[in-house]
């Protein structure tokens, strides 16, 4: 459930008209709903508790939505942060996430990033390979620290709607095999500079079936039992993210309660703390991208292009993953649906959000909203074609605030310097 609703035919976010935000902030603009973010987090948390998973560390995947106000909204409810760069750790800290709720994942952490995570005192550094473990040991020794680490396992299960977002197959770059994980965990347990506390996995994104999760979780339980049988201590099991968001044309994903019951069943009797890293589930349906129709360009061959002021630089998911986003008019539009190719202003054919989508008849100047855009939307935006980065607005009840403003053209040029030989 989300708080983007039609009232009198107009699309609102909580108690604010999207049209009013577009009027004041301009378009394109991302709009997030506080009530929806809060609801998604509490539903997840309560489902875990009801299923008997205790009070797990729920660390929202910052990569899905890294806006500091969004992170702070979640942090106030006790939500942690799953991060993959120093930048994301800094964002989480700026949002008030305590270090003991920050997880640091990622296959390519640099020496400087590892040092930053160690001195910050994050809950767990998820090690993804043997060379990374060796580097981490070196950095920790230099700092005279003993950080808590997890070994990330690649459980070799196929999951996720699109090849580009599947992470848990052996051919993907993430994590190590079970055999290697057991070896590295034992090795790290005997090292004075790291303290292994957890094993972790994450198998993919927008997963709409419980079976791959269950397969991976069963294998993870086996690993914990094996390590403990060897006399090693495993305090936490990090089960990653990946549960799909209800996504209009896609199969309906399992409800958080069903997911939690499955996890609890697989883990029954295993005395351990759990961690989860949900991204999309929390943020996707809590955000929309509002754009304006610039032109309607009809071709004699019959194609009808709806040219928007938002492009693939603002929302890249359709171009990159062929992903579907529901498109809704912001103000009522009457009349029989017409088939539109919805495109942006970028000079690339890939800048096409959808083709031949039946939509209500639009006119130039109309506003529309791309739904389910709160996750992997603004975070993946760019200045391609030298377009200013898309701003973000957070709504709470009747109030709204610009939580990242649109940069000026002067700001866009500010970091560039003319090479000295160009005078
Ligand atoms: N934990 C780790 C280690 C991850 O790599 C990811 C996502 C998550 C958690 C969060 O997964 P979620 O719950 O959001 O599915 N840009 C793509 C999605 C890439 C996901 C990458 N990893 C998209 O727009 O669909």
Image: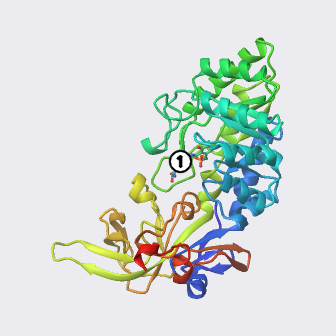
Some atom of ligand 1 lies within 8 Å of the CB belonging to the residue at label 1: no
- Neighbor class of circle 1 (other Cα within 10 Å; few <14, some 14-19, many 20+) is some
Q: Nearer the viewer, residue 132 or 168?
A: 132
Q: Quadrant of residue 97 in the image?
A: bottom right
Percent of width and height locating residue 65: 62, 59
- Image-based side of 356 in relation to 269, left or right: left
Locate the C terminus and report the quarter of the image it occupies: bottom left
Q: Which residue is mark 1?
A: 252
Asked whether residue 151 appears in the rendered view, the answer is yes
How is the model colour-coded?
rainbow
Q: Nearer the viewer, residue 203 or 7?
A: 203
- Rendered position, 103 above or below 150: below
- Image-based side of 166 in relation to 343, left or right: right
Instruction: Report the residue at 52% width, 29% height from top.
Output: 157
Percent of width and height locating residue 382: 49, 66
Task: Identify the element where label 1 is drawn.
Answer: loop
Q: Nearer the viewer, residue 226 or 335?
A: 226
Percent of width and height locating residue 239: 67, 35
Locate the N terminus and report the quarter of the image it occupies: bottom right
Percent of width and height locating residue 206: 53, 46
- Image-based side of 268 in relation to 311, left or right: right
Instruction: Report the residue at 78% width, 16% height from top.
Output: 228
- Rendered position, 208 above or below 86: above
Instruction: Report the residue at 65% width, 39% height from top.
Output: 240
Q: Nearer the viewer, residue 264 or 154?
A: 154
Asked whether residue 238 appears in the rendered view, the answer is no
Q: Quadrant of residue 237 in the image?
A: top right
């Amino acid at each position: 459930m989300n708080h983007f609703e039609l009232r009198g035919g107009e699309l609102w976010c909580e108690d604010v008209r999207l049209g009013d935000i577009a009027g004041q902030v301009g378009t394109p603009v991302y709009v997030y709903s506080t009530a929806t973010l809060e609801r998604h987090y509490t539903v997840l948390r309560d489902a875990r508790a009801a299923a008997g998973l205790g009070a797990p560390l729920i660390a929202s995947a910052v990569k899905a939505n890294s806006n500091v106000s969004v992170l702070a909204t979640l942090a106030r409810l006790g939500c942690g942060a799953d991060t993959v760069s120093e930048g994301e750790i800094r964002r989480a800290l700026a949002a008030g996430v305590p270090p003991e709720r920050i997880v640091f994942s990622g296959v390519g952490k640099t020496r400087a990033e590892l040092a930053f995570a160690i001195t910050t005192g994050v809950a767990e550094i998820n090690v993804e390979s043997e060379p990374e473990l060796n580097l981490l040991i070196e950095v920790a020794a230099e700092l005279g620290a003993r950080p808590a680490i997890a070994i990330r396992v690649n459980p070799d299960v196929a999951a996720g709607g699109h090849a580009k977002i599947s992470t848990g197959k052996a051919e993907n770059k993430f994590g190590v095999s079970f055999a290697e994980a057991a070896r590295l965990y034992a090795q790290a347990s005997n090292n004075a500079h790291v303290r292994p506390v957890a094993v972790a996995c994450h198998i993919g994104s927008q997963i709409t079936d419980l079976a791959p999760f269950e397969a991976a979780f069963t294998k993870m339980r086996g690993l914990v039992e094996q390590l403990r049988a060897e006399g090693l201590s495993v305090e936490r099991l990090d089960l990653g993210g990946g549960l799909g968001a209800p996504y209009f044309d896609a199969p309906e994903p399992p409800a958080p309660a069903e997911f939690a019951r499955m996890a609890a069943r697989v883990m029954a009797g295993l005395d351990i703390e759990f961690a989860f890293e949900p991204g999309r589930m929390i943020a996707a349906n809590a955000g929309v991208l509002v754009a304006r129709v610039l032109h309607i360009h009809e071709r004699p061959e019959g194609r009808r292009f709806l040219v928007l002021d938002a492009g693939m630089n603002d929302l890249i998911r359709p171009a990159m993953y062929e992903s579907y986003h529901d498109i809704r008019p912001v103000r009522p539009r009457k009349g029989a649906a017409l088939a539109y190719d919805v495109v942006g202003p970028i000079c690339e054919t890939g800048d096409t959000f959808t083709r031949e989508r039946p939509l209500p008849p639009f006119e130039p100047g109309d506003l529309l909203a791309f739904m389910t855009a709160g996750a992997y939307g603004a975070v993946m935006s760019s200045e391609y074609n030298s377009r200013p980065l898309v701003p973000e607005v957070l709504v709470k009840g009747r109030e709204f605030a610009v939580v990242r403003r649109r940069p000026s053209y002067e700001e866009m040029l500010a970091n560039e310097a003319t090479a000295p030989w160009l005078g």
